[in-house]
Amino acid sequence: MELIESQAEGLSRVYRVVASAADLQARLAAKIEEVRPKMRLNGFRPGKVPPAHIRKLYGPSMMQDIINETVQKSTQEGLARENVRVASEPRPELESDINQVIAGQQDLAFKLHVEVMPEFTPADVRSVSLVKIVAPVSEEQVETRLAELAKSSRRFAEKDGPAAEGDQVVIDFIGSIDGEAFEGGAATDASVEIGAGRFIPGFEEQLIGAAPGEERTLDVVFPDAYPVERLKGKAASFAVTVKAVKAPAETEIDEALAQDVGFDSLQALRSALRDRLEQEHSAQTRLRAKRALFDKLDALHDFPLPPGMVNAEFDQIWRQLSADRDAGRLDAEDASKSEEELRIEYRRIAERRVRLGLLLAEVGRRNDVDLTQEEVREGLIAQVRRFPGQEQSIYDLYVRNPQLMAQVRAPLYEEKVVDFMLELAQVETKTVSREELFADDEA
């Protein structure tokens, strides 16, 4: 069987494949002879069922299997023989009458629709100039982070007098809608920090002025974006009993604070905070350098993109954007745009992602960039650690599933190719402040 190219347009190819009826019938006969020694049918001795009888009973289903195998094998072997680099799963289109083929009265003929990878030469990365911005970690930043930790770790102490903004109120409450208590609307000894914004809008504010022993009714309306569907937009009343009012107590930055958050000493805590800040700066420096590299590469390359890959990338982006829009999570800029404007903008983003993905793959292929087994193993371990208590089962699931392993390899491979290109590019280092390093980070 041969792949004969019958149509070529852009990156789309159509190949025609023909398998003769005689060849298929020969394969059917071989298949029958293979199973005949094990065949047991009433009225026949084991292994003595006549081939014609097997063909009559099982020939159509066996031929269907042979046809499926032929299509799959001829596709794989033909594309490999012709050195066709496919961009998406080939799509066969049967031309023959399947019943005639099964009956041995017609050749198996089908068209193979394929999108191929574009042929292009990557720009020389050595000609790319980049500015890598770095920001040293200062003692002031460490102390600021330490103060934030102390604030988030602050305690509350009982106070005399009514509750005020910033105080913590300990309450029991029962919620009702139209006079009926609802599931999940009651709690005992709940701690409410007034002004923290952790409860339904209006709930915390109505506790201002409350004193221990007081009973209040709080009237609120659940937001339209509330995660529980049956409560969205509903008006509710909460019968509240105030049990205690506490004021925030100043948390000292001392050895006791360090021990409270799991460190042996205040010095060890400061050192850990510095390490974390340095990791944040290093990650942001790489992110900005990678973004700058991608911007330069995108501007240097213009080659045709496989429509199927672009459509798949756009569909994935659009599903996420639609979910964010339905949940009210779009930023103000996107929320102000029409659907048509959003589709145009995010299709451009999809095209950029596909273009850069193809470029990285080509650079890696031409320069023999590959992942080591150890790098893949470390990436897999990092992935399974996201599932505490299920590590072994998740590890086994990934190892058995090539598609899941491909999802582990893809970002690792991208980062390795990026490292390769950053080593070749002309990179100038510029020292900036932390604010500058993290500025314009919405991209």
Image (tube, rainbow, N blue to C red):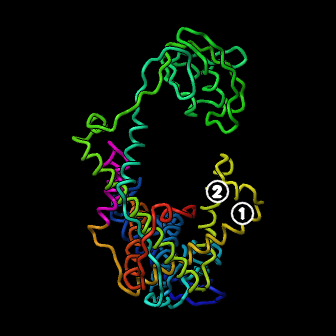
**Main structural element of the magenta stretch: helix, strand or loop?**
helix
Which label belongs to residue 321? 2
Residue drawn at point x = 24 percent, y = 46 percent: 267
Residue 70 screen position, x and y as percent: 49, 76
Q: Amino acid at mark 2?
A: Leu
Would residue 400 be visible to someone looking at this image? no
Residue drawn at point x = 34 percent, y = 44 percent: 388
Residue 210 screen position, x and y as percent: 59, 16
What span is colored magenta in the figure? Answer: 376-400
**Tags 1 and 2 touching, CB below 8 Å:** yes
Q: Amino acid at mark 1?
A: Leu
Task: Work out how far the residue at label 1 is from the one at label 2, CA to CA, in angstroms.
Answer: 9 Å
Where is residue 225, by image quadrant? top right
Residue 381 screen position, x and y as percent: 31, 56
Residue 202 screen position, x and y as percent: 66, 28
SS label for mark 1: helix
Q: Verify whether residue 307 appears in magenta.
A: no
Q: Residues within 10 Å of mark 2 (few under 14, many from 20)?
A: some
